[in-house]
Amino acid sequence: MPRTLQTMRDALDSQEWDRIEELWLEALDQQPIPTLELLEVRRMMWKAGRKTQAMTLLELLVETLEATDDARGTLTALRELIRLANSTDPKKVERLLKAFTTVRQQSPSLDAVIRHYDPTQSRHPLEELKTMETWLNHDVGTVVEVQGQGVGRVTEINLKLGNLKVDIGGQRPVSIPFGAVTRYVRVLTEGSFLRLKVEDPESLTASVKNNPGESLVHILEGMDGPVEVASIKSALDGVLPTSGWTSWWTKARKNPRVLSSGTGSRLRYHVTDSAEDAAESLLADLKSAGPRERLKAARNLGQRGQADATRAAELLIEGFDQLIADDPGLAWETADLLATLPGGAETATLYLSELAESGLPLQVLSGIRERACRQSALEQFRVSRTDEWPEIWAEWLLHEKTSSMLDHIARELDQSGVSEALDTALETIFRNHLKHPAQFVWASEAVTNTDAPEVLRRRLRPSLLEKIPDIVSRREFSDFRSRGKGLLEGGKAAIRLILEQASPQQATRFAQRLGRIDSIDPSQIRLIEQAAQQAKGALTTDEEVILFVATGAAIKAKRAELKTLLEHEIPKTLKGINAAAAEGDLRENFEYHMLRDRQELQSAKAAKLQEDLGRVRALEPGAADVSKVNIGTVVHFDPVSGESIEPLTVLGAWDANVENRIFANGTDLAKALLGHNIGDTVTIEGAKTRIAKIEAWQG
């Protein structure tokens, strides 16, 4: 313990308040000022009931730090001062912003971030400051790792749209929503292996070639925990030739600091501080780890063999009664693991039964991080508490955030004849949607599913249009922006409501509100506006029906594309999802969520292709009616004035090729020509011209 903190703690123990002030003043004369130690003393004084004195000393600390131009210390202390104050002092917030500006003065986007989130204009300045720090931690030029994508530099931050872009090389920049940045984007520390791939690839390549063992240690030191071989290979991508992998790996893994755990697809590697035996190292980790970390350490040790697994079980059993009292959810997860270890099944069964019969089911469920384990706990409550389980499940519906689990809970409540409990929970979600963002988004998606419970489908009401815009605009829904935009697509809640139930006034108001949200793509707004117009019967004929046609070659290509999706790409993605799911806790498993997103996109693409192929009309070469401009015709022009215009062809969307002057029949240019006769004057590409000849497209 630092000397300043220990001396002041001694004075605190003896309640020598004047002595504490003397020591505080002495600390302010030190260089550098021990800011963090003094803040800890402040915390202890506060706990001892000396709040006024603590605030006075904290004010003095801030003033001294400002006088010594210690901007970083000032920022830390001012943040604490503002947090503890009964009300927000605008002058203190201005000082906070000044310190923040000094600390972040090298950040390229500093001025833009301040203008966008100005804490001096906010009722919650510390929340704005935290948001500003997150943006600037990922400012333009920062080297980051995007989980499941690769390593690169941030090339753009868009405060208005709420996303940032990362150039990972050789591909289009990856766009990440701001709400997902802290979970899926990792800022790489100076000197880390992955960062050197961007900053000094030549030196890194030489090091990898000449020092395989040390390079492997370098890679593993930069990883967040044990990793599979695939992650190591990915880190070496572009640094080590594929042909040299086997030889390199054979040498590298012999480094005594490199440890492995698990078997088969679960084989993982990590690095220790020394070259001690792997089992002893894992055992030491298990003994010294905190409750949550012990669970992970025991799982790793349990994968090494019978003897180590037995020892892991013995250590988990120690202190289990206290764990039940302190963290029932973690106790459940621990007992669930214990049941799989040698000699632990009987004890685990007793503990799980005790937890299931306890009076704190929500506390148990809230502390369980792994989805499969939560589902197991719900089932156990259902068996152990036959009269209460519907209420337990329905109440947990208000807390569960995983869509698959929410589907499971709703379906089981409905099929078990207790839909009243489900209906009550849904009423809570829809009435207080800002307090239940994950559940509201799930419910808004599920209301249009034909296999959803009837009590859920009945929630597809026009009043939902008043709340959907919150998903794409309010901070409470920052993690669900893309899913909120999905609700605006054809066949989803918004379009269904506009076309089937909403009044013209409700539809128009909804479209106008969306139009004021900058992050929504204009094409989506146009779709909503068209639906609103259709609801009023105001769509024009060419907007209502656009003939869908294609050449035989295009249809053949689309069928081949659909076959590839159904027989190769989707099965490959599903295989990857299953492999990623086997890794355990999916909430922080970016690869799993990326694959799920990919699978959803692939399935949607396949469904759209199937739909389009079912309604497409084939164009036969030479078969078009040339008495006027039709689909499948080539149009020639005589200039009325100015330069001549090259002939153009009107085909379907699948055949469009602007460079070869082939235009889709749904484009504005094609629609301006369709139906016109030879001799008609038309405006094409900004110039007036006369249709001179109409020929049938010959293929």
Image (cartoon, rainbow, N blue to C red):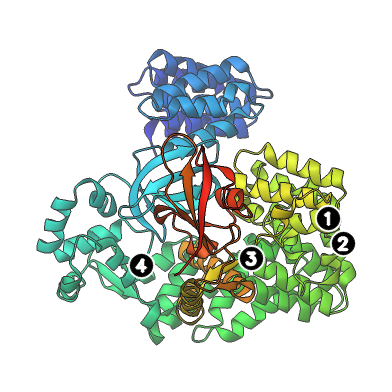
The quarter in which the C terminus is drawn is bottom left
Residue 644 appears anywhere in the view: yes
Disc 4 and disc 1 in contact, CB within 8 angstroms:
no
Name the secondary structure under disc 4.
loop
Q: Tag 2: Cα neighbours inside 10 Å, few (<14), some, or many (≥20)?
A: some
Q: In this view of the protein, which residue sits in the foreground, 264 or 528?
A: 528
Camera-near label (1 vs 3) is: 1
Q: Amino acid at mark 1?
A: Thr
Q: Which residue is mark 1?
A: 428
Q: In this view of the protein, which residue sits in the foreground, 151 or 29?
A: 151
Q: In this view of the protein, which residue sits in the foreground, 539 or 494?
A: 539
Residue 569 shown left or right of residue 88 in the figure = left
The quarter in which the N terminus is drawn is top left
Name the secondary structure under disc 2.
helix
| 237 shown above or below 279 | above
Q: CA distance from mark 3 to mark 4?
A: 26 Å
Camera-near label (4 vs 1) is: 1
Residue 336 on image: x %, y %: 58, 77
Q: Tag 1: Cα neighbours inside 10 Å, few (<14), some, or many (≥20)?
A: some
Q: Mark 2 or 3 closer to N-term?
A: 3
Q: Which residue is mark 3?
A: 329
Q: Which residue is mark 2?
A: 424
Q: Amino acid at mark 4?
A: Val
Residue 429 appears anywhere in the view: no
Camera-near label (4 vs 2) is: 2
Q: Which residue is mark 4?
A: 227
Q: Mark 4 or 2 closer to N-term?
A: 4
Residue 261 on image: x %, y %: 35, 75
The label on residue 587 is: none
